Image (cartoon, grey):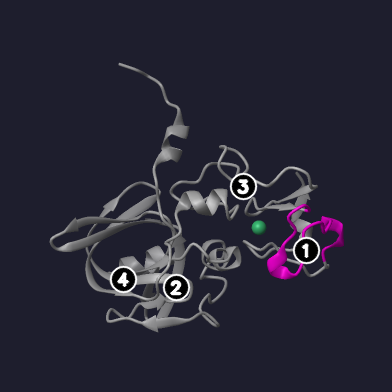
Amino acid sequence: MSGQMDLSALYEISYGLYVVSSTHDGRVNGQIANTVFQVTSEPPRIAVSINKKNLTHEYIRKSGVFGVSVLDQSTPLSFVGLFGFKSGRDADKFPGVSCEKGVTGCVLVTQNSTSILEARVVTSMDAGTHTVFLGDVVSAKRIRPGTPMTYAYYHAVKRGTAPPEAPTFRGAAVEGGAAPKAPAGGAKYVCSVCGYVYDSAVGDPASGAAPGTAFEDLPDDWTCPICGVGKDRFSRA
Ligand code: FE
């Protein structure tokens, strides 16, 4: 019997990146999840693992329905941040985001999505910090051709991070060898909220900061492209 516990072995399990949404009392919410998987094909059933603290958890629990949007590899970090690092209790995430209403009443995010699915919960399992919801797929639709984002791509190429509520959170976001990786060379500043690393060699082209822009030279109203906090929440990495 081996007693080895090298938890980095868990990093080698593959995942995708999804928006899981639900609805309750006319309100809608959605969040980023990486733990969505097909469980059976006859009937088509999928499962999601959702943190009990999240508003989406409350809505799925109460409504018994959830939606899944499969995000494309081209999805901007800011979009992942909107659904992954902001709580629906503090902000409505949906204004300005392309969506459609499904047969379950869930609002499904179609922006940046390759496919959308809806499911009705048939059973759930208490997994400690999370609940695993198992659902029958009641609608499924392709939105556009694309390449679904994998969790590995999100970490390695998009330099994305995971919030503490994620089932696969790796402690401090800069540890663990997978996230985030910035090219060597520039001065780096790390976001204290989400772990995003600003690298001056890379800049933040999405916000207009060209490669080579020093952190100090970013505009005062520049915000973290993942979680949206201001420059004051960054410190030198
Ligand atoms: Fe951040």
Give the labeled residue for mark 1.
210
Q: Quadrant of the C terminus?
A: top right
Query: Looking at the magenta stretch, what is its main secondary structure?
Result: loop
The answer for how far apart the CA atoms under marks 1 and 3 are is 19 Å
Magenta segment includes 227: no
**Residue 231 location in percent, x, y?**
77, 60
Residue beneath the point at 66% across and 63% down? 225
Viewer-proximal residue, 69 or 1? 69
How packed mark 2 is, by other alpha carbons closer than 10 Å (few <14, some 14-19, many 20 or more), is many
Q: Nearer the viewer, mark 1 or mark 2?
A: 1
Residue beneath the point at 53% across and 77% down? 92
Q: Nearer the viewer, mark 1 or mark 3?
A: 1
- Give the amino acid type for the residue marked by disc 3 in the picture: Pro
Of callouts 1 and 4, the N-terminal one = 4
Q: Which residues are magenta?
A: 200-218
Q: Is residue 163 visible?
A: no
How packed mark 4 is, by other alpha carbons closer than 10 Å (few <14, some 14-19, many 20 or more), is some
Give the labeled residue for mark 3.
180
Find ligand 1 in the image and state its quadrant: bottom right
Of callouts 4 and 2, the N-terminal one = 2
- Give the amino acid type for the residue marked by disc 2 in the picture: Asn
Viewer-proximal residue, 18 or 85? 18
How packed mark 3 is, by other alpha carbons closer than 10 Å (few <14, some 14-19, many 20 or more), is many
Residue 117: assigned label:
4
Dot 3 falls on a residue whose secondary structure is loop
